[in-house]
Image (tube, rainbow, N blue to C red):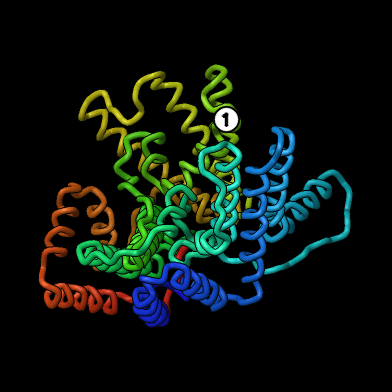
């Protein structure tokens, strides 16, 4: 049930009305939201609903068991069980076939020919997100950062809450669990902001992201040799714009949907292509994942303790595993490695200086240009299904040919709009949102209807899935 479909609008309308009718009966409302969330997931594949319920149940029990544990050794053993359960799920469903195939390829290169072994099971949608969320709860309980969750119903709803279930943002237990434990209150201004977010998210996703994907990115990446270097460059920049509009658009709709139900989600994007170095980029891109990797992986590895060499090692390991988190393909690992090396180099060059500050306006502009092109070059690996495909794409870029019959005026305009909208002053966006929320309800309806017409005019015949659904 994609956010950019009429089916989701109908589903959400029912959930919105019923959940607020039950606002005075908190437990009954939570039970309804939990049922609606499982129904939402079941529309993809009902056979995997027990997987979410089962993993959530195990982590809820382990969190409480850790809180009751009599000594540190028992607590640590239970934490290991949590890691084995959650990472084991990812290993079986997401990485088993990849690992076996990689091992077979290595043995084949050494002259051995082991038999083919494969599970070939469907990848449960959103498994990387809900396993990270559930695992973070148990780790937080172990560290003493959050108290154990006594309410089984609240915990199940925290993991399965449909706005963030399949593609994030990765919501921390300390952010969401207290909200589920509190009475829901409807606020008209907040609801208006939520509607504005949903409209902006749909425009990003459909009018820019999907249009670029269907008319430029997919065609060029599928057959780079049939395009010029200029068209390949436009496609690479187009993919950078597409993946941002697609994922941040999804996040906007998720945050807006949750807010309409009285729940606040954290910000997940902060104009990442404004970053003037890679450290700054990862403070702006997919913030819920980058902070998760920082807090639960980078710091656990030692962080920046122990000298520069260990800091660089920890950055590389974190980003390599972050790349692997995105998918079972060595191109993702290489993408993570590029970012890890770039982060280490940034740390080396800048030393102890604040990574969010530039030495001068010129240095900031130059940094933005260089960072954007580094990130865009890395996106080519991220988008390619193999190293061979990436080599073809980079090879065509190296030809420096400039013919461009596939870059029509409308396509260039959408690409330019997608880029330019990223660099507009923040006050323009906040001003537009404020003006929308102060409009009378009928005028808000007119504005939303106009946005809907714009989405429909740019939409393809069939809804295009969100990029991050595959992770």
Q: Residue at x 41, y 53 (%)?
A: 236
- Give the structural element (helix, strand or loop) at label 1: helix
Q: Residue 352's spot in the image, x, y percent?
A: 39, 19
Farthest top residue in view:
307
- Looking at the image, residue 45 sits to the left or right of residue 14; the answer is right
Q: From the viewer's perspective, is residue 227 above or below residue 382?
A: below
Which is more toward the observer, 217 or 394? 217
Q: Which residue is mark 1?
A: 314
- Looking at the image, residue 100 sits to the left or right of residue 351; the answer is right
Position of the C terminus, as image quadrant, is bottom right
Which is more toward the observer, 85 or 218? 85
Residue 13 in view of the camera: yes
Q: Residue 203's spot in the image, x, y percent?
A: 28, 67
- Looking at the image, residue 33 sits to the left or right of residue 206; the answer is right
Residue 235 in view of the camera: no
Which is more toward the observer, 6 or 138? 138
């Amino acid at each position: 049930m994609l956010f950019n479909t009429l089916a989701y609008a109908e589903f959400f309308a029912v959930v919105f009305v019923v959940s607020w009718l039950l606002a005075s009966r908190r437990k009954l409302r939570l039970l309804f939201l939990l049922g609606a969330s499982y129904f939402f997931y079941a529309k993809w594949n009902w056979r995997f609903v027990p997987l979410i319920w089962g993993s959530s149940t195990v982590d809820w029990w382990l969190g409480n068991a850790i809180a009751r544990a009599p000594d540190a050794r028992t607590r640590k053993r239970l934490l290991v069980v949590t890691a084995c359960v959650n990472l084991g799920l990812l290993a079986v469903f997401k990485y088993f076939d990849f690992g076996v195939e990689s091992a077979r390829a290595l043995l084949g290169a050494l002259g051995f020919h082991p038999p083919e072994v494969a599970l070939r099971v469907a990848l449960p949608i959103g498994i990387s997100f809900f396993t990270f969320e559930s695992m973070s709860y148990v780790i937080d309980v172990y560290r003493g950062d959050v108290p154990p969750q006594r309410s089984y119903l609240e915990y199940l709803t925290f993991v399965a809450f449909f706005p963030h279930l399949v593609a994030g943002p990765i919501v921390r237990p300390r952010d969401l669990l207290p909200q589920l434990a509190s009475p829901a209150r409807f606020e008209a201004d907040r609801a208006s902001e939520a509607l504005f977010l949903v409209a902006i998210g749909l425009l990003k996703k459909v009018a820019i992201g999907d249009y670029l994907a269907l008319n430029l990115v997919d065609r060029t990446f599928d057959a780079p040799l049939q395009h010029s270097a200029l068209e390949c460059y436009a496609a690479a920049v187009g993919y950078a714009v597409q993946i941002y509009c697609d994922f941040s658009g999804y996040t906007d709709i998720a945050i807006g949907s949750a807010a309409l139900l009285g729940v606040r989600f954290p910000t997940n994007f902060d104009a990442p292509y404004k970053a003037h170095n890679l450290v700054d980029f990862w403070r702006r891109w997919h913030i819920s994942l980058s902070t998760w990797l920082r807090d639960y992986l980078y710091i656990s590895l030692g962080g920046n303790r122990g000298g520069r060499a260990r800091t660089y090692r920890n950055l590389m390991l974190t980003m390599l595993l972050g790349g692997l988190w995105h998918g079972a393909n060595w191109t993702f690992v290489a993408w993570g490695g590029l970012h890890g090396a770039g982060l280490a180099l940034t740390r080396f060059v800048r030393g102890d200086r604040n990574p969010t500050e530039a030495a001068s306006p010129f240095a900031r502009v130059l940094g933005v240009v260089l960072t954007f092109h580094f990130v865009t070059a890395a996106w080519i690996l991220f988008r390619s299904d193999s190293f061979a495909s990436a080599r073809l794409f980079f090879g065509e870029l190296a030809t420096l040919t400039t013919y461009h019959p596939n870059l029509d005026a409308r396509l260039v305009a959408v690409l330019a709009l997608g880029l330019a909208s990223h660099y507009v002053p923040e006050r323009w966006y906040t001003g537009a949102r404020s003006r929308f929320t102060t409009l009378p309800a009928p005028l808000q309806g007119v504005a939303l209807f106009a946005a809907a017409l714009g989405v429909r005019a740019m939409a393809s015949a069939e809804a295009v899935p969100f990029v991050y659904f595959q992770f």
